[in-house]
């Protein structure tokens, strides 16, 4: 039986990747190199500091710890400028309908995100009240594919991992769910998310029944 659904935030509920991209790009440009949309794909589901490491790798630059912390903070300031302009219109299509469907069926909803800005984003989208439990980047010490973020969510709700379904758009996130003993619905492309139990392009037309029949295949 399914008792709870645990959602990743970035790339599942909302497309924040475009804002991360603008902010990382301007940081890269400031450091004297370019940062492409393709490069940005590598940062999906990856923590802020690890993202900066990857960015440094791309630019072939080496920075000391103190500078890294300063630059990550600067990147976040620019990112926040965009986040604070977000409105509920930016909730991805079908997400809210699916949340309502889950509520009506008594299924609990949790957040499992690596982002330290998750609360701000949920507030901007006016979605906070839908969540029965919220676990974000401020609550965990181990990054996906470690299952910590999802296991904490299950624990807060009081359910076994086997009764939770995770929704993820990043490969590391799908692995985290599987590592935690949960089933996982991939949001995106089946080529990338081949470890998920099944993959859909998004939530448009997606319902509790779609989820059940997909998982029982
Ligand atoms: C999510 C995003 C990543 C982002 C990470 C940390 O996992 O997919 O691109 O780097 O959260 O986000 P933060 O808001 O804490 O910088
Ligand atoms: Mg994501």
Image (cartoon, helix red, strand yellow):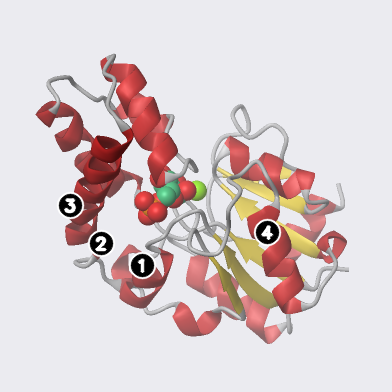
Q: CA distance from mark 3 to mark 2?
A: 9 Å
Residue occupying the point 23% across, 53% down: 79
Crowdedness near tag 3: few (<14), some (14–19) or many (≥20) residues, C-alpha within 10 Å: some
Element under disc 2: helix
Sequence order check, earlier mark of 2 and 4:
2
Q: CA distance from mark 1 to mark 3?
A: 14 Å
Position of residue 198 in the picture relative to residue 71 (left or right): right
Residue occupying the point 79% across, 61% down: 212
Q: Which residue is mark 3?
A: 78
Q: Which disc is residue 64 wearing?
A: none
Residue occupying the point 35% across, 19% down: 57
Q: Which residue is mark 4?
A: 150
Q: Given contact means CB atoms under 8 Å apart, are the residues at marks 4 and 3 in contact?
A: no
Sequence order check, earlier mark of 1 and 3:
3
Sequence order check, earlier mark of 4 and 3:
3
Q: CA distance from mark 2 to mark 1?
A: 7 Å
Position of residue 150 in the picture relative to residue 50 (left or right): right
Position of residue 106 in the picture relative to residue 138 (left or right): right
Foreground tag (2 vs 4) = 4
Sequence order check, earlier mark of 4 and 1:
1
Q: Which residue is mark 2?
A: 83
Residue 126 at x, y percent in the picture:
37, 79
Q: Given contact means CB atoms under 8 Å apart, are the residues at marks 3 and 2 in contact?
A: no
Foreground tag (1 vs 3) = 3
Towards the viewer: 42 or 202: 42
Compared with residue 199, is residue 204 higher up or lower down, i.e. above or below?
Answer: below
Towards the viewer: 103 or 138: 138
Q: Given contact means CB atoms under 8 Å apart, are the residues at marks 2 and 1 in contact?
A: yes
Q: Given contact means CB atoms under 8 Å apart, are the residues at marks 1 and 3 in contact?
A: no
Q: Which residue is mark 1?
A: 121
Looking at the rendered image, the quarter that the N terminus falls into is: bottom right
Element under disc 1: helix
């Amino acid at each position: 039986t399914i008792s709870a659904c645990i959602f990743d935030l970035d790339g599942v509920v909302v497309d924040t990747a475009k804002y991360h991209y603008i902010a990382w790009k301007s940081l890269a440009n400031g450091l004297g190199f370019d940062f492409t949309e393709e490069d940005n794909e590598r940062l999906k589901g990856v923590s802020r500091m690890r993202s900066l490491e990857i960015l440094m790798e791309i630019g072939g630059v080496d920075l000391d710890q103190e500078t890294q912390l300063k630059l990550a903070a600067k990147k976040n300031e620019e990112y926040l400028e965009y986040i604070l302009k977000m409105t509920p219109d930016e909730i991805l299509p079908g997400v809210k309908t699916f949340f309502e469907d889950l509520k009506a069926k008594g299924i609990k909803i949790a957040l499992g995100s690596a982002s330290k800005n998750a609360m701000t984003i949920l507030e901007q989208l006016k979605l906070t009240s839908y969540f029965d439990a919220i676990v974000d980047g401020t609550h965990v010490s181990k990054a996906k594919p470690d299952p910590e973020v999802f296991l904490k969510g299950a624990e807060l709700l009081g359910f076994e991992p086997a009764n939770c379904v995770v929704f993820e758009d990043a490969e590391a996130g799908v692995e985290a769910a599987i590592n935690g003993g949960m089933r996982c619905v991939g949001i995106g492309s089946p080529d990338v998310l081949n470890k998920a139990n099944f993959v859909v392009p998004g939530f448009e037309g997606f319902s509790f029944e779609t989820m059940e029949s997909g998982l029982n295949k």
